[in-house]
Image: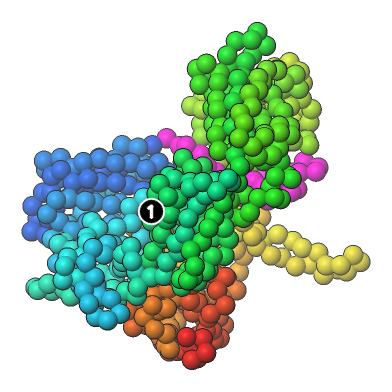
Amino acid sequence: MPRRLPGDGPGRQLRAAPGTACLLFALAWFTAGGCMDRPTVAPRTGWLVGDSGEPVAGAEVQAEANIRTEPAGAAPDSATVSGADGSFTLDSTRPDGAYRLLVDATGYARSVHLLPPSYRSAGADPERIVLTRGEQVRGKVVDADGRPVEGAHVRLRWPRKDQKHTWLLKAEDAAEMVTTGTDGEFQFPRVESGQYSLRIWHEDHVKLHGRRVDVVDSDDIVDIGTFTLTRGSEIFGTVTEAGGSPAAGVTVSVDHSPWFERGQIPPATTDEHGAFRLTGLAPEPTDLILAIDDEPVSALPDVRPDAREPLVIELPERSSLALFVVDQQGRPAADASVFLAPSHELMMKTRRPITTELFRQTQTGSDGRLRFDHLLSGAWNVETERASEEAAIEEVLLEAGKLREIELVLESRDSLAPTVVAVTDDADRPVPGATIHFWPEGQGHTFRFTDAGGVVAIPLETGATTIAVSHPKHADVFREVLVEADENHVSIQLEPGLEIAGSIRAPDGTLLTFAEVEARALQTETGEPGSEAVNEQPARYEAARAVTTGSGQFRLVGLIPGRYLVTAQAPGFSRTRRPEPIVLDDGSVAGIDIVLDPGGSVAGIVTGLPPADLARTNVTLASPEEVREPELDVAGRFAVHGLTPGEWSVRATVGGIESTRYAEDLLTIEPGTFETFIELPFPARFR
């Protein structure tokens, strides 16, 4: 049975002020997983040794926070170099933060290690990390006729679907990129054994990405196979100015869907005749973006590659705008922020997909001046601001081929009043790193972090403002204040938040390290007017998250009284929800023991596609609560483990997310099922 933590006093149910119910959603959106605070840091230490026990000196060690459980700024990243005895110290980490440790040492395989949090008052124990020499890995790249492809770039990446490597990675490569030789062969000198994702691209061929490869322990070179690239399609043509003269130096690039494929095809630059050629394209329509000096000026949507006739693209007429920003005394306003946006009419006339890329934001120089070139002719809106001063002009008309000069005079925003918010805990100590959200009535939302003294100073619009304060170790506070013209001082005292604590185990009783745990508050929904029906649903966005320590323990902190659903997951196990809600009323709860279900496994294969299409195929498994995206191997096989029992939709899609070429099926994972096989065949008419 769960037990109350000793010494817990009664919790206070904090209620939002009238009219602020919708703020609960917004606050959760900006602080999901806990407040985006900047807490006190403490060193994490350890030492590196080789597989023979020798110290490893001069290794680069980087610690990256787990962004799923540590919101931005909550657990700072850190980097260092190991000493002569192999020891290292990461100064800016946090003891109770979860980190991914990347180690790169000469003569050893690049490796990743997980640092779980520590809730001990003495901090985390030193980490002993053993590096291996790794395996030599080789492979070969050929074209559709079996001929070697020279000059193909090959990258070996850690798989994103593996929790150990699932971060917003700053470093994704498990080894330095290599290039194929005249025989089409490539070789990675040192790679840890394990599963990886292979990416290959060549300027004349369709890229191959997301191919799963396995590196096994071996006394010999590990051969991961031969990979076939299909010759890519091409788009070629000329770019001219509005009068028909050649436009040299224009960058022509492709805008692939989905967005994460952008930049995979090298752009082309027009020559003195305005000619360009893009190669290595997939055989499907794509958008072209034309830019001058990195500023988009035109676009051509849905261009089909391999057209027999060259494209002729005429650039629109362009204009320039020069701004001079001054203060009330006519002095140049240095470092003023300037925002330039197309008018609604200009947006409607502009071809996608560059409409959202027309917006510009920059700052004035020391002389208060700024110039924009390569602007589309038409009406533009200009705004500038500096501190509590601002200026704006709407519908500035720019004529084709002309430069327009404008002077902007900054004016004081009389409606702004300086406001100082001081945040303390229940012992009147300053609370640094608290997030304070401000919602002035009828205005936009903004937020700030308290400094080392627990203070935030910010100019606010006069009138009613809602202030929300959150911190991971305290309960949230909402306050309605009236901002007056003179300086305003607001004092807010935070009370300790409640906690849910416990452990995560495997079915055999083994305590699991680095399992992810989350708690979502149950929200009450009523039925139709006049109905007595009441339904409880977990909050969609707001969740407290944590990962287990080396001893399988977790703490979910900063909670307010309420009913919570607690869910846990770990690699090799299905997402497991505690059947009964945990009730927090007059104190915190400890002793929660969750046993993870191993879940089911799926082995599958995509059939009926040629290598060129298989290289562009993605597989998705989706249930009502989660989505899995396994990677295919060169034969189209895939495997997924730890699936929650229930119905899953399985789809293989060729190309981007909007593609109509797919094969799909429904799959039911029965409780206790070890493995299920599924085939996703593409009929001949879809090949």
Q: Is residue 24 magenta?
A: yes
Q: Is residue 195 visible?
A: yes
Q: Residue at x 15, y 43 (%)?
A: 58
- The amino acid type found where label 1 is placed reads Leu
Q: Residue at x 70, y 17 (%)?
A: 412
Q: Is residue 5 above or below residue 432?
A: below
Badge 1: how crowded within 10 Å, few (<14), some, or many (20+)? Answer: some
Circle 1 SS class: loop
- Residue 457 figure quarter: top right
**Magenta segment, which residues?**
12-40
Reading the image, the residue beneath label 1 is 169
Estimate the x, y position of residue 149 in percent, counting from the top left.
24, 70
Foreground of the two, 8 or 328: 328
- Residue 381 figure quarter: top right
Estimate the x, y position of residue 360 in percent, counting from the top left.
58, 37
Q: Which residue of the protein is positioned furthest toward the top in this rendering?
A: 329
Estimate the x, y position of residue 59 in percent, counting from the top left.
18, 46
Q: Which residue of the protein is positioned furthest toward the front in this rendering?
A: 244
